[in-house]
């Protein structure tokens, strides 16, 4: 509109990409909804369903008032009243090694475009419809029943309109594919999203994407026949043993030893792969990954990336000083050598900065931000890279998604239709 200030170049790039580089900081702010929506044409991810947990926030002044949160004060005093055990001391030492988190947060709040960024997110959020559509399917339970091999999913591909035609439905030529939904690679090979139907519920598959839905026992079915068809980027979000997840019955967890059998080496492209593993802040888990899991996979640790979580006003979702509820998670990065790759090849692609920080507003419980694009410049092997997510609960354009519920966040209730 006339009179409105022209957005800065950085803000314009953010509005297109969903990624905002923070100056003088090893941090970047991302809007997951904007990033995800680049995989769709006829639909878009609904901001209100994505940001439902942390967009309604208390005023920062209320949070800074000690009397406003007696539970938080009680937890802090409990920590001071007793000495930390050996594992807690190690975890605290690892935590103290991340002073850049506060600096990154200050950079976000001090960015010239920060008010405009949050205003853009807020305006789209407020205009969105609330979550609706009835109870979702439990793919985990459906995959266990004897009828599972008989279940089909129907993909409804709509042809593009010819020039000068109107969208009255008569000029559309539909192609339908009926495919087994479990233990089968379901592919959308079109450059636009497609609507699918399963047991009377509808799902949106992003462009040029595919999924394989199975439990851990069938994961080797996705191993390529030849390493030349393997993957250059492997993102893994395991269902680690987690008391909170069990209490909330969000998803079933698995003992750590189960993940030792993941065929990471067999999934790796002959030119090598960047492996990105989401972990919790438990010291026992970090030790397991560093001493057992990465060596079993043939992965050499490179660096740690931090996901710092903020609310809709930019404030942290919890105090950085809280011992068991820290407002960040870690992504451990490492390289897995392919047949044509050795340790001397690591200098051939862009090195990864250690302790890089990604800041975003979280989505649903255990839903991770889409960080694939930020990792692509560090991926070895062929270009463009072949990418896969293990234990996926949603899909990305151009990616393979494997897990026992990769369609969880693809339910139509999480989307809005784009007016074209």
Image (tube, rainbow, N blue to C red):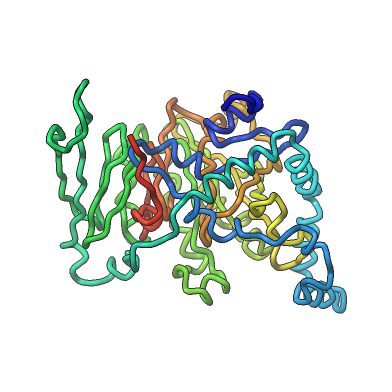
User: Is residue 191 depicted above or below 45 in this figure?
Assistant: above
Q: State the image coordinates of residue 35 (x, y, percent, origin top left).
A: 50, 39
Instruction: Return the residue nearer the eye: 309 or 339.
Output: 309
Residue that lies at the very extreme toward the top in this rendered image = 163
Location of residue 200 (image quadrant): bottom left
Q: State the image coordinates of residue 73 (x, y, percent, origin top left).
A: 81, 73
Q: Residue at x 21, y 33 (%)?
A: 167
Instruction: Return the residue nearer the eye: 343 or 317.
Output: 317
Q: Is residue 344 visible?
A: no
Q: Residue at x 57, y 32 (%)?
A: 378
Q: Residue at x 53, y 60 (%)?
A: 366
Work out which quarter of the rendered image holds the N terminus and state it.
Answer: top right
Location of residue 198 (image quadrant): bottom left
Work out which quarter of the rendered image holds the C terminus and state it.
Answer: top left
Instruction: Return the residue nearer the eye: 101 or 136.
Output: 136
Q: Is residue 73 visible?
A: yes
Q: State the image coordinates of residue 107 (x, y, percent, origin top left).
A: 77, 40
């Amino acid at each position: 509109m006339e009179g409105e200030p022209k957005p800065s170049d950085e803000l314009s790039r953010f509005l297109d990409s969903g990624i905002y580089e923070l100056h003088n900081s090893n941090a970047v702010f991302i809007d997951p909804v904007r990033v995800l929506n680049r995989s769709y044409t006829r639909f878009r991810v609904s901001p209100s369903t994505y940001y439902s947990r942390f967009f309604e926030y208390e005023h920062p002044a209320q949070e800074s008032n000690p009397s406003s949160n007696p539970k938080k004060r009680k937890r802090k005093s409990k920590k001071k009243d007793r000495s930390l055990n050996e594992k807690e001391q190690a975890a605290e030492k690892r935590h103290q090694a991340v002073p850049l988190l506060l600096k990154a947060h200050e950079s976000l709040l001090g960015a010239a475009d920060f008010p405009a960024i949050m205003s853009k997110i807020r305006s789209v959020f407020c205009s969105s419809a609330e979550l609706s559509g009835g109870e979702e399917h439990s793919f985990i339970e459906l995959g266990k029943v004897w009828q599972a091999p008989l279940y089909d999913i129907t993909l409804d591909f709509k042809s593009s309109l010819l020039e000068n035609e109107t969208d009255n439905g008569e000029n559309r030529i539909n192609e339908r594919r009926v495919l087994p939904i479990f233990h089968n690679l379901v592919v959308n090979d079109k450059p636009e999203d497609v609507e699918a139907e399963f047991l009377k519920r509808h799902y949106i598959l992003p462009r040029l994407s595919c999924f394989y839905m199975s439990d851990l026992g069938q994961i080797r079915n996705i191993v390529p026949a030849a390493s030349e068809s393997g993957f250059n980027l492997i993102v893994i979000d395991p269902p680690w043993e987690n008391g909170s997840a069990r209490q909330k019955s969000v998803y079933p967890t698995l003992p750590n030893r189960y993940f030792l059998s993941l065929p990471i080496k067999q999934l790796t492209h002959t030119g090598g792969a960047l492996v990105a593993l989401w972990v919790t802040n438990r010291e026992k888990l970090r030790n397991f990954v560093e001493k057992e899991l990465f060596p079993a996979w043939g992965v050499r640790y490179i660096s740690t990336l931090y996901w710092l979580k903020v609310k809709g006003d930019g404030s942290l979702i919890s105090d950085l000083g809280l011992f068991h509820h820290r407002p960040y998670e870690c992504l451990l990065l490492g390289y897995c050598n392919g047949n044509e790759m050795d340790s001397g090849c690591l200098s051939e692609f862009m090195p990864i900065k250690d302790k890089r920080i990604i800041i975003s507003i979280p989505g649903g419980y255990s839903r991770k931000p889409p960080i694939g694009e930020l990792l692509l410049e560090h991926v070895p092997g062929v270009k463009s890279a072949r990418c896969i997510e293990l234990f996926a609960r949603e899909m990305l354009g151009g990616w393979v998604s494997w897990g026992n519920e990769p369609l969880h966040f693809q339910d139509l209730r999480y989307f809005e239709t784009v007016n074209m």
